[in-house]
Image (tube, rainbow, N blue to C red):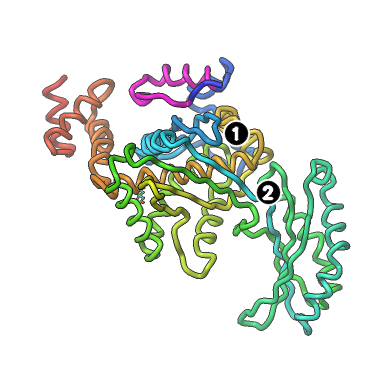
């Protein structure tokens, strides 16, 4: 397998980058053409995806390089509108690679469906009656999805919670379903709806909601890494990153921004692969608050040799079958570039990407600050807005950064001088 380690990837032309990715992922000529063509998602296909379609909306697809996860090289497709995310992710992956890359694990693809029963006269006893009927409930649920069962998945267990609500006690049944390589929403929602009459009979109450929970805490991926202190520029930088993490652990205002940085990477890959970004965001933030205190999704510590160790745990309700993943032409190619065999592997890649993205942000925040790099990228946007094209974009941007004047009027002046 080719290495994903490349230096100066950003300096290549789009065609040169495509050539590299084509070779790495064995893309066909048609796939390369689809990546290059604006409007790869046809109006017809878009019209079948959602309602009231009037057009399509494009975003850049970038590739984060340098990822080594469990000794396997990955190129990471990312769809994102924010400059510097892809570059930062690639740089952090390079730092992590110096220490052996990322090591990951996961729980398995278990999604939770919730069935809410109200007006239950004896909630505690009803809970036990439901647990006694576990086998009947699982069998009924599995009858709804024989294909999933054939693939080795299906309803695995139930849990029953009695929760206090404003109206009194509710009996909430959780159906735990192994959804294999699907995101799983359709499978678990269908099962939950089918169970409603049985739950009503057993509890004597009335069933209201039957829907999955996005707090997918039975479908968690983990990643860890060790970054040598020398790669970071010394132990002071390690200490700075640990302090930045401890700030997030102590303060929800900071934790929100810390996690936003994690999700810059995660959401970009989720979107590139045609998965549901809102499900992942809801899962991540509710998981970050699962103890009742909203905290950071990652942890950073110093090991006995003074190196930086990082870890993350993240709910990852993503699939490789169904939905936009199999319909959107560019998402299909992004999945091929990523080369994940299972949804579990994709989840673990997401965890590694989230950890890398967070490392990049904390390293910059703990040292030079975020603005220097951001302003350089911002300068290119200002140059384009001022009317620069082609090579002039970089020339004008660099001149503005050198002069410390990133302004549209100055960009116009430079364009006049340089053209
Ligand atoms: C910007 O998109 C993300 C950061 O604010 C994340 C962070 O502060 O950790 C840089």
The percent coordinates of residue 163 (x first, y second) are 66, 76
Say which residue appears at 47% left-offset and 55% top-offset.
297
Front one among 99 and 299: 99
Element under label 2? Answer: loop
Q: CA distance from mark 2 to mark 1?
A: 23 Å
Q: In the image, which disc is placed on residue 328?
A: 1
Front one among 149 and 33: 149
According to the image, label 2 marks what residue?
Answer: 109
Say which residue appears at 58% left-offset and 53% top-offset.
315
Q: Is residue 101 magenta?
A: no
The percent coordinates of residue 364 (x first, y second) are 30, 45
The percent coordinates of residue 38 (x first, y second) are 48, 26
Q: Main secondary structure of the magenta part?
A: helix
Does residue 265 lie above or below 339 as drawn? below
Where, quadrant-wise, is the C terminus in this rendering?
Answer: top left
* Residue range highlighted in magenta: 4-24
């Amino acid at each position: 397998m080719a290495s994903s380690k490349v230096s100066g990837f950003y300096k290549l032309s789009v065609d040169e980058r495509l050539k590299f990715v084509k070779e790495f992922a064995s893309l066909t000529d048609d796939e390369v053409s689809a990546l290059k063509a604006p409007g790869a998602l046809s109006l017809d296909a878009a019209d079948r995806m959602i309602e009231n379609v009037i057009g399509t909306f494009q975003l850049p697809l970038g590739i984060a390089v340098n990822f080594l996860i469990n000794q396997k090289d990955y190129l990471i497709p990312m769809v994102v509108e924010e400059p510097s995310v892809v570059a930062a992710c690639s740089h952090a992956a390079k730092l992590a690679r110096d220490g052996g890359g990322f090591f990951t694990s996961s729980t398995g693809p278990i999604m939770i469906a919730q069935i809410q029963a109200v007006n239950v006269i004896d909630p505690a006893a009803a809970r036990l009656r439901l647990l006694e009927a576990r086998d009947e409930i699982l069998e009924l649920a599995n009858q709804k999805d024989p294909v999933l069962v054939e693939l080795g998945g299906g309803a695995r267990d139930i849990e029953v919670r009695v929760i206090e609500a404003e109206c009194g006690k509710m009996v909430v049944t959780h159906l735990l379903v192994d959804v294999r390589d699907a995101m799983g929403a359709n499978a678990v929602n269908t099962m939950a709806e089918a169970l409603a009459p049985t739950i009503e009979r057993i509890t004597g109450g009335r069933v209201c909601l039957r829907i999955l929970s996005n707090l997918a805490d039975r479908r968690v991926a983990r990643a860890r890494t060790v970054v040598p202190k020398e790669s970071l520029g010394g132990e002071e930088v390690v200490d700075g990153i640990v302090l930045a993490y401890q700030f997030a652990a102590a303060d929800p205002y900071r934790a929100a921004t810390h996690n936003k940085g994690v999700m810059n990477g995660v959401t970009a890959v989720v979107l590139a692969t045609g998965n549901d970004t809102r499900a992942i965001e809801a899962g991540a933030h509710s998981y970050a608050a699962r103890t009742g205190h909203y905290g950071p999704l990652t942890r950073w510590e110093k090991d006995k040799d003074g190196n930086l160790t990082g870890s993350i745990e993240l709910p990852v309700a993503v699939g490789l079958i169904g939905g936009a993943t199999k319909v959107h032409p560019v998402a299909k190619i992004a999945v091929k570039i990523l080369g994940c065999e299972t949804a579990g592997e994709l989840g673990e890649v997401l965890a590694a990407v989230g950890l890398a993205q967070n490392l990049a942000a904390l390293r910059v925040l703990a040292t030079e600050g975020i603005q220097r790099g951001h302003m350089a990228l911002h300068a290119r946007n200002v140059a384009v807005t001022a009317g620069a094209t082609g090579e002039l974009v970089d020339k004008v941007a660099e001149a503005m950064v050198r002069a410390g004047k990133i302004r549209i009027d100055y960009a116009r002046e430079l364009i006049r001088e340089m053209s």
